[in-house]
Amino acid sequence: MKLILVSVTLTMSTVIFTSGPVAAQPCCGGMQLVQADPLGDKTGGAQAKPSRVKVIEWQKALKDRGYDPGRVDGSVGLKTRSAIGAFQKYQGLKPTGDCDIETARKLGVRP
């Protein structure tokens, strides 16, 4: 089942296509739609943004293992995601490009 939701404001219109249920949550003086999780996750599956300190730790660990995360600057850019994905693939993990708990454990850093 596909749900098409069209929301129009004074100067912007948004069309959201989704294959699952959505939930609305308060955000920025209005409402934000998120993918509803049948297991009760209210965030829509989104993870909290990692701190710059954690990202620098990930980048250093990747660089020490021969992966190129780009500049070690605490920013999760394309090169960092690519390096994480390559590391995940080599470790037999699903290459998502996100430093999840299992990836962090294998990398020897905090998730």
Image (cartoon, helix red, strand yellow):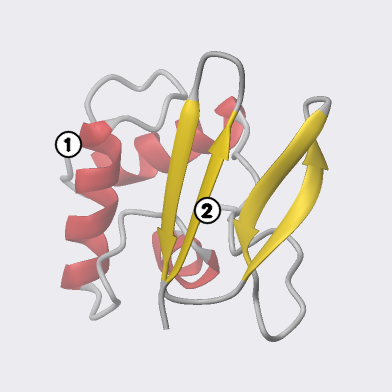
Name the image quarter holding residue 44: bottom right
Q: Position of residue 86 (x, y in %)?
A: 17, 58
The residue shown at (31%, 62%) is 96
Does 16 sit above or below residue 94?
Answer: above
Give the CA separation, mark 1 to mark 2: 17 Å
SS at badge 2: loop
The residue shown at (55%, 67%) is 101
The residue shown at (65%, 76%) is 37
Q: Are marks 1 and 2 in contact (CB under 8 Å)?
A: no
Closer to us: 11 or 17? 11
Say which amino acid is labelled 1.
Answer: Asp
From where the camera sits, is residue 87 visible?
A: yes
SS at badge 1: loop
Work out which quarter of the rendered image holds the C terminus and state it: bottom right
Residue situated furthest top in the rendering: 11
**Where does label 2 land, which residue?**
109
Does 32 sit above or below residue 75?
Answer: below
Does 36 sit above or below residue 17?
Answer: below
Closer to us: 32 or 60? 32
Binning the other alpha carbons within 10 Å of mark 2 as few (below 14), some (14 to 19) or many (20 upward) gives some
Say which amino acid is labelled 2.
Answer: Val
The residue shown at (52%, 53%) is 109
Q: Position of residue 11 (x, y in %)?
A: 52, 14
Work out which quarter of the rendered image holds the N terminus and state it: bottom left
Indicate which disc residue 68 carries: 1
Is 91 situated left or right of 16 in this image?
A: left
